[in-house]
Image (cartoon, rainbow, N blue to C red):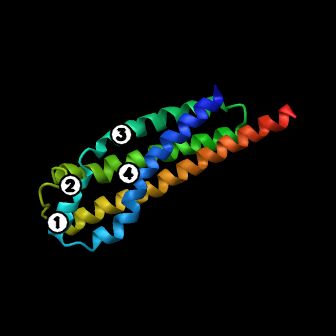
Amino acid sequence: MLFGLQIAAITSVTLCVIPAGAHFFERANKMALSPADYMSVQQIYAGWAYFGIAVVLALLTTLAHTIAVRRNRIAAVLSFASFVTLTGTQAIFWTWTYPMNVATQNWTKMPAAFEAARRQWEDSHAVAAVLAFAALLLLAASALIHNSKDARRAN
C-alpha cells in the first residue's frame, strides 16, 4: 500500500511540475513580447485551472505519505518538507499570481500598469516552479530513503 501511495504522490507532484516548468522555461521569451502579443499569447492558458486538481492531489498524497513514513525520521522530514514547499507554491499563487488574473480578467483586459502586472505574474510563476521542482526532489528523496531502509531490513 505504501508503494502505491508513493507512486500517487510522486505522480501528482510531477503533474504540478509540468505546467510550472512550462511557465518557467517560456518566461524569457514572453517577457520580450510586445504588450499586444503578450496579451494574445496569454490566451493559451485557458483551461489550465484544471491543474488545480493535481495540486490538491499532490498536497493530499504528500501529507498522507508523510504520515505513512513517520517512523523513519529522515523520510518523514523530507516528505513533510515537500508538503510545505507545495504549500508555498499555493501561497505564491494566491498572493501574487491570482490577483493578476483577477485584475486582467484572465489576461483578456490590458492592465493599466502592464509591465508591473506582467512581471508579477511571470515572476510568481517562476518562483513557484522552482518550489514545485524542489518538492518533487524532496518527495523522491523521502521515498528512496524510506525504501532503502526497508530493503536493508529485509536482507
Specify which label sits upstream in the sequence, 4 or 1: 4
Q: Name the residue under label 1.
A: 113
Secondary element at tag 3: helix
Specify which label sits upstream in the sequence, 2 or 4: 2
Give above or below for 136 relative to 40: above
Specify which label sits upstream in the sequence, 4 or 3: 3
| Mark whose residue sits in front, 4 or 3 | 3
Specify which label sits upstream in the sequence, 3 or 2: 2
Amino acid type of the residue that numbered disc 1 sits on in the rendered structure: Ala
Residue 100 point in image, percent of width and height = 23, 54
Task: Left or right? Give the position of 86 relative to 1.
Answer: left
Q: Mark 2 points at which residue?
A: 43
Q: Name the residue under label 4.
A: 92
Task: Left or right? Give the position of 56 relative to 10.
Answer: left
Instruction: Using the rendered view, name the quadrant where residue 49 is placed.
Output: top left
**Residue 44: which numbered mark, if any?**
none
Work out how far the residue at label 2 is from the one at label 4, CA to CA, in angstroms.
Answer: 21 Å
Amino acid type of the residue that numbered disc 4 sits on in the rendered structure: Ile
Q: Considering the image in quadrants, where does the C terminus appear? A: top right
Specify which label sits upstream in the sequence, 1 or 2: 2
**Residue 52: which numbered mark, if any?**
3
Amino acid type of the residue that numbered disc 2 sits on in the rendered structure: Gln
Secondary element at tag 1: loop
Amino acid type of the residue that numbered disc 3 sits on in the rendered structure: Gly
Secondary element at tag 2: helix
Instruction: Using the rendered view, name the quadrant where residue 128 is placed.
Output: bottom left
